Image (spheres, rainbow, N blue to C red):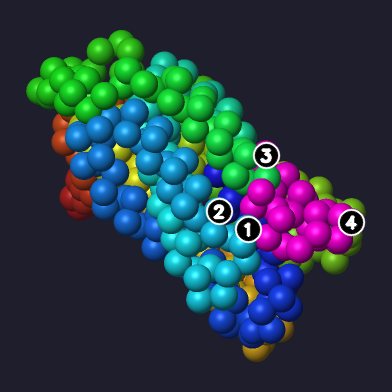
Amino acid sequence: MGMNDAAVGALIPYIETYYNITYAIVALLFLSPFIGYLVAALSNNLIHHKLGQRGVAVLGPISRMIGYIPLVSHPPYPVLPVVLLFAGFGNGLEDSAWNAWVGNMQNANELLGFLHGAYGLGATIGPLVASAMVTKGKLPWYSFYYVMIGVTAVNFVAAITAFWGATGKIHRETHQSSTGEKRTTTMTVKSAWAGEKRAIAIYLVISLVLELLYWLVPNFVASVIFITFLGFFLGPLFPAVIVTATKLLPNDYHVGVIGFAAAFGGGGAAIFPFAIGAIAQSKGVQVLQPIILALLIFLLLLWLCVPGGFKRGGLERARENKEGLGSDFKSLFASMKRLLRGRS
């Protein structure tokens, strides 16, 4: 999945030259997979109920194959956004399914770290392989998708082997039996050392400081250090969001909610590079750092709206008490009111 998502950006200049089109037109290749992700987000809950994880294991790789096989024949450009929509759909199905599956395991924080680390490895390797094939191997841009067909075939065999017994009937029975009951031990995720909410709030504050230093300190070596640590502290965000969702929401909502999270994440990955690139072309690259800083501040404020406080076990208590978004702020304001009344 990481190779699929990241390689498009590396191939954009070669596709632009090959078809003799403008950047604005070729940038549709960023937006097309997002639509596929969105369709997957809307349908993955139904697919789980009807076909189970086995259905996802079949439909995900097949959808990507439907995207990749036409690409190796380098069709007219209008075909490219259409077939990449299928690749995005396949990625969206598997992204939400495997995140929800791992997020319900014990030690979910650590396991999701490995899962997203594997995605990050693919996202690192994909552009390098794609660029090397074109620049060093003197191969046309579409040759990279032969590699993706091979990788997807391996993924298909592995997923079918692992999830052949996970039918829709089993999925329905599992979720019906858990309705109205407390989570069993197998569904309980161990908290991180400080609890997800506190840990991620700390990581976001550190990320804000690192981004500010990266922006203000004009030194190459220092910039490399700052950006490396920035990636280190931003890395746990998405896994922590998945674990938080599995702790706060009923089991039957996990696949749908995580699907939407993955879709919006894919949307951000599609829209923001295009939008920020257009702004940078118009106003200069100096606008990039203030935009990223503003996004980090927005993320921190949004994260603080998650209920449960900053103590370990707070998310579980918030679920039991049916607390909503922003409940911590409401409690804080209520405490301040009581304090002011006591002083008066």
Query: Is residue 114 placed above or below 282 in the rendered structure?
Result: above
Q: Nearer the viewer, residue 342 or 14?
A: 14
- The residue at which mark 3 appears reads as 121
Q: Nearer the viewer, residue 47 or 310?
A: 47
Report the quarter where the N terminus lies: top right
How packed mark 2 is, by other alpha carbons closer than 10 Å (few <14, some 14-19, many 20 or more), is many
Front disc: 3 or 2:
2
* Amino acid, disc 1: Val
- The residue at which mark 1 appears reads as 72
Front disc: 1 or 3:
1
Please say if the residues under marks 4 and 3 sit with CB atoms less than 8 Å apart.
no
Please say if the residues under marks 2 and 1 sit with CB atoms less than 8 Å apart.
yes
Q: Nearer the viewer, residue 73 or 240?
A: 73
Where on the picture, by quarter, is residue 119?
top right
Q: Residue 27: image x %, image y %? A: 57, 74
* Amino acid, disc 2: Tyr
Q: Is residue 262 visible?
A: no
Inter-mark Cα distance, 3 to 2: 21 Å
Mark carried by residue 136: 4
Inter-mark Cα distance, 1 to 3: 24 Å
Which region shows up in magenta?
A: 120-146
* Residue at the image point whose x is 20% and y is 35% from the top: 50
Q: Is residue 126 magenta?
A: yes
- The residue at which mark 2 appears reads as 68
* Amino acid, disc 3: Leu
Disc on the earlier residue, 3 or 2? 2
Q: Is residue 214 left or right of residue 185?
A: right
* Residue at the image point whose x is 27% and y is 30% from the top: 52
* Amino acid, disc 4: Lys
Quick one: which residue is furthest to the front in this view?
73
Please say if the residues under marks 2 and 4 sit with CB atoms less than 8 Å apart.
no
Question: Mark 4: which secondary structure?
Answer: loop
